[in-house]
Image (cartoon, helix red, strand yellow):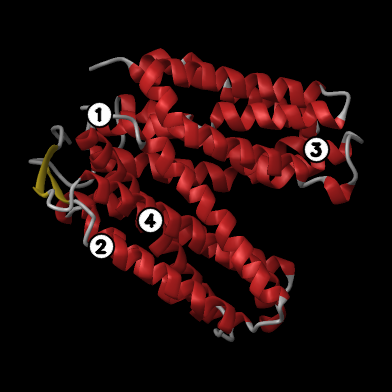
Amino acid sequence: MSTRSTLFTSQAMAPGLPAARLATRLAFLVAGFGVACWAPLVPFTKQRLGVDDGVLGLLLLCIGLGSVIAMVVTGALSARYGAKPVIVAGGSGLAVVLPLLTIVSTPLTLAIALLAFGAFLGSLDVAMNIHAVDVERADGRPLMSGFHALFSVGGFVGSTVMTFLLSLHVGTLASTLPCAVLMLVAIATARSRLIVSTHASNGPLFAWPRGIVLVLAGLAAITFLVEGALLDWSALLIAGAGLVSAAQGGLGYMFFSIAMTVGRFGGDALTARVGDRVMMSWGGLLATVGFAVLLTAPTAALAMGGFVLIGLGASNVVPVLFRRAGSQRAMPSTLAVAAITTTGYAGHLAGPAGVGFMAKALGLPTAFWVLAVMLSLVPACAHLVTRER
């Protein structure tokens, strides 16, 4: 099955590049904001339905399942209809489903709602990255890191707003409604500013990743896997090593997140100066060194420094991978971006479980050393994935 490279045609650039950049940032902001609004609702949902941890875990997997299914088909939809309608539908659907998550009364209806929530999130994730590739290409300078930084900002704002409302004893439904309205307003603002584009191809709209896209997807999976492992296991790692108390275990991931956000805000300017290859090589190396510092640190302060190095180093790897997916010629760019998003998300989901299995067999520190070795593939492959084709 052969598919020739995509042909990008802009049907309407009337809003202008500044407007298109704003619309892309709003899409990333909505995605981060929406998923972060759900996290504080999980304890309330468990209590309302009266389910145990096992059932709750299965229900939460529905988000991932819905996202992966949607990601697989979104590349094809964006290739045929453009990213704009998918972004509008995904962002609006995410906003509409969020309040529904607070009123469903049975595990089955919650599972259906979470599948829909995940599907809208997954479709928005793929489409906004496709749109970001198009806007960056049209602008002629690196923009991807800044776009991804807005996802982190959205996550911080969403979790803060929702936690604040719930702490005031506002009901869960009442707390989600203003958040949903904010998301709808952001999508409505972005709608007229999104580029109307098509990615025409004379081959099939779906193709298995191949060539350099396989390498890009694999590196994305590793990078997201590392992030997921840090989210779920870093607190136990540093607390188990006696560096911090259990109550302070979340400090490591906090430093990692702050460093990653800061790194992405400055990543576009730095990439414009040094290029993708240097950014990926030194970023991957810095993140790998950060793991070594973290795993050998004798004090909490040094361990926090390791988290900062990992966050700074890894911050711009994924933006480079998406940029390269948009410029490669092995397959249509829309399908390449969808493949990278899907494998990255799968890595984020599989990472915590994989680390758990390794930790049980080899110990948690050894499992983290394995992550460091896997992450070293990023700088090792930098020349391969950034080579002009």
Disc 3 target residue:
237
Using a 10 Å C-alpha cutoff, classify the residue at mark 4 as few (fewer than 14 neighbours), some (14 to 19) or many (20 or more).
many
Frontmost of labels 4 and 3 is 4
181 or 51, nearer to the observer: 181
Separation of residues labelled 3 and 1 (CA atoms): 39 Å
Mark 2 touches mark 4? (CB < 8 Å): no
Frontmost of labels 1 and 2 is 2
Q: Earlier in the sequence, mark 2 or mark 3?
A: 2
- Label 3 SS: helix
- Side of 367 relative to 182 (left or right): right
Disc 2 target residue:
191
Q: Earlier in the sequence, mark 2 or mark 4?
A: 4
Disc 1 target residue:
327
What percent of the width, then of the height, locates residue 150? 46, 48
Q: Earlier in the sequence, mark 1 or mark 2?
A: 2
* Amino acid type, callout 1: Ser
Separation of residues labelled 2 and 3 (CA atoms): 44 Å
Mark 4 touches mark 3? (CB < 8 Å): no
* Amino acid type, callout 3: Leu
Residue occupying image coordinates x 42% and y 39%: 146
Separation of residues labelled 4 and 1 (CA atoms): 24 Å
Disc 4 target residue:
26
Residue occupying image coordinates x 48% and y 50%: 151
